Image: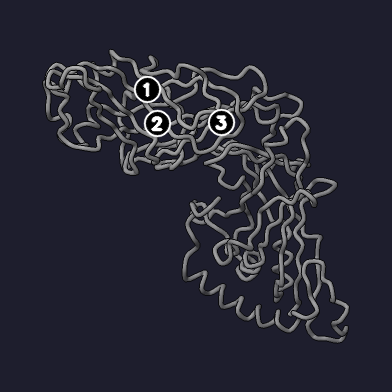
Amino acid sequence: MTNYFSSKNLLRSLRIVKIFSLLALSNILFLQCINPPDFIGGDLIPPQDIFRVKTDTSFTLSVFTEPYDTVVTSYFSEAIVGETFDPVFGKTRASFLTQVSIPTLGHDFGTNPVLDSAFVYFGLSTQFGDEPININIYELVDSLVVDSSYNSLSPIDNWFSPTPIGSAPVPFNGDDDILKIPLDHNWVYDKLINPTLTDTTIMLNQKNFLKHFFGIHVAPSTTFDTHKKGMYYFNYLGTNSKMVLYYKNDEQEVDTVSLFYTYVFSDASLRFNHFEHNVEAADPDIKVSFNPRGSEQDSVFYVNGFGSAKGVLVLDDLVNWIDSMPVAINRAELRIELEEQSNLPVDSLLKNLFIYQMVDNKSTNILDYSINGENHGGSYSRSKKYYSFNITYHLQSLLNDSDSNNVLYIEPRGAFQRSGGAVLRSGNHSSRMKLIITYTKL
C-alpha cells in the first residue's frame, strides 16, 4: 500500500543507516564475485578469506491469518460501491457516507421555485468485475464530526434513514462513464428548497448548511445469489461528481431552460467508505480460515482487501541469528508462493502484496520501503509463481536491536482501496515461504 503509513522514528533510522554505510563498504569487497541470492561467483572467494559469504534458506517462519478490527478510510479520493461473492472469502459489500457541500454562499432559489429534476452524479474511475448492481441513496440522520475517526468495519445501520431518497433507474455495470441517480422530487423540495425560502441562514455558510443536511449514504440495494463480482470505484473529487437541482421560478423568462444549482463533493467534505464481510457465505470446504498467533500454523494463509484478512508473519529464527552476531546481511529476500485456487477467478489474482510492521500501535513502513521503495518488491511473478520482497535493511536492523519486534504484517497493496484476495503458502507448507539470506560472518 502506498504511502499511507508513517515512517519510523527519524533518529533510529539515522542510526541504522550509519550501520548500513559500513555494510555497504563490506559489500564492495565482494561485488565482483557475488550475485545474491543465487550466489553466482561465490567460488571465486578463497576459503582462507577471513570474510566468508554464505547463503541460508533454513530460516524458520510462521504465518497466521487474522481479521482486521479497524480500517480507516476517511477523506478517500475514490468512493466505492458494489459487491463481490466468491467461494473462498464469501461476500464483501462496499458503500460510502459523505457530506454534501455548497459551492457558493447565500444562494436564493427565487420566488415560487418549482423543481424540474435533481440528480446525483459520480464519475467512474475503475472497476473490479462488471456484474450489474442496483444502487440507492439514503439521507444521513446524524452528522459526521471532523475530530472523529470512523471505523469502516463498524455497523452503520443507525446512520441513515432506511427509505431511499434516490435509486438508479437501471442496474449499473460500468458501461457508462458516469453514474446518474435521480433524486425523489418531494424529498428534494422538502429538504433542500422549501426550508431555505423561510430560513435564509441555511445557505448563508457551510456550517449552517451541514447542520440542516447531514449528507448521504450511497450503497448497493441488492445482493448476489451466485459467485459474481461488481465493485465500482468513483472519482470523488472529479468534476463529474456532484449533485444538481434543476428548477424554475417566477423571475425566469417564459420558455427558457431550467435554472440549476450544483452541490459539490469537496476535499474538505467529511466522508468514509464502509465495508461488510460475510465469510459464512463462502464454501465451507474451502473458505478462509482464521488462526491467530499462538494457534497451530496452517499450511496456507489468507489475505483479502477492504479489511477482510491479513497475514501475520513471525520471524521465529531471529533469536538464533541474534546469538550468532556480528553478521552483515548482504541481501535478505522473502519469497511468498501463491497457492493456486481454481475456485477464484483468474482476473482476481493479486498483482502486489505489501509488508509493514507495527510501531507504538501504528502501521509503519519497514526500512527497505522507506529507503528504496522501488526495489522493495512485492510484485507477483507469473513465471516463478511467487511474490518477492527485499527486506535486507529491516533484517539487519532487527539483528542489531535485541529488543526488536519479530512480527510483520502482509496484506494486498492498497488493501483499504481495492478488493481482491489470495491464498498463500505459509512456513508450514511443503513448498513453504522462504527467507533467503546472503550474509557475511564478521
Q: Amino acid at mark 1?
A: Phe
Mark 1 or mark 3, which is nearer the start of the sequence?
1
Q: Which class describes the residues within 10 Å of circle 2: few (<14), some (14-19), or many (20+)? A: many
Mark 3 or mark 2, which is nearer the start of the sequence?
2
Residue drawn at x 84%, y 82% is 45
Asked if the residue at tag 2 contacts the one at tag 1, i.e. Cβ–Cβ closer than 8 Å, the answer is: yes
Residue drawn at x 73%, y 36% is 346
Q: Which mark is residue 97?
A: 2
Under tag 2, what secondary structure? strand
Closer to us: mark 2 or mark 3?
Answer: 3
Residue at the spot of label 3: 231
Q: Position of residue 363 (x, y in %)?
A: 52, 52
Q: Nearer the viewer, residue 189 or 379?
A: 189
Under tag 3, what secondary structure? strand
- Say whether residue 152 is visible: no
Q: CA distance from mark 3 to mark 1?
A: 22 Å
Q: Which class describes the residues within 10 Å of circle 3: few (<14), some (14-19), or many (20+)? A: many
Q: Amino acid at mark 3?
A: Met
Q: Residue furthest front?
A: 255
